[in-house]
Image: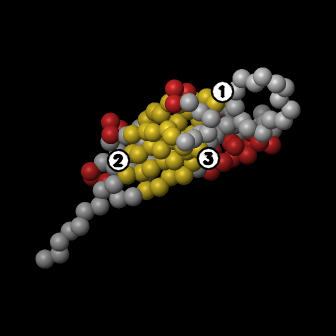
Amino acid sequence: DPLAELESWARRVGFRPSSRWPHLLSAFDGVDFTPLADIEESDKAWTIEAELPGVDKKDVEVEVHGRTVVICGERKEKERAGVLRQRRRVTGSFRYEVTLGGDFDADAITANLADGELVITVPKAEVDQPRKITVG
């Protein structure tokens, strides 16, 4: 997703668009980071694997808007007993969107978060699954 990569880069380098530059990142206003994700397509489904270490299941939402799957939520700051001397991990709100290239059964989508990885399986609609045609 090129826009997600652009958004991630812009936030990492602290870039803020000027009034003369089109604000392509408006869908990500108020978002602190975009999780890394892979998308795999098979004949029967798409599988989205997003890295969400340190995120609790109750802090993740998966939504469908048309053909777009949206993952959003929050990675909360850990309570600390001492003074934090260095911060490298990003906390705060996150958002990831992907528009899939075909119809799917939204009611059959499954999502599982384990070991810091969110795996979403999006079964393709029957009409989008390949069929072998017998040649006579």
Q: Residue furthest left?
A: 136
Give neighbour class at mark 2: few <14, some 14-19, many 20+ (Cα, 10 Å). many
Looking at the image, is mark 2 or mark 1 earlier in the sequence?
1
Name the amino acid, label 1: Lys
**Percent position (x, y) of residue 104?**
35, 45
Looking at the image, is mark 2 or mark 3 earlier in the sequence?
3
Evaluate whether residue 35 shows in this view: yes
Name the amino acid, label 2: Pro
Which residue is tagged 1? Answer: 76
Name the amino acid, label 3: Leu
Evaluate whether residue 29 shows in this view: no
Q: Residue furthest bottom?
A: 136
Give neighbour class at mark 1: few <14, some 14-19, many 20+ (Cα, 10 Å). some
Looking at the image, is mark 3 or mark 1 earlier in the sequence?
3
Which residue is tagged 2? Answer: 123
Determine the CA span between mark 2 and mark 3. 22 Å
Which residue is tagged 3? Answer: 36
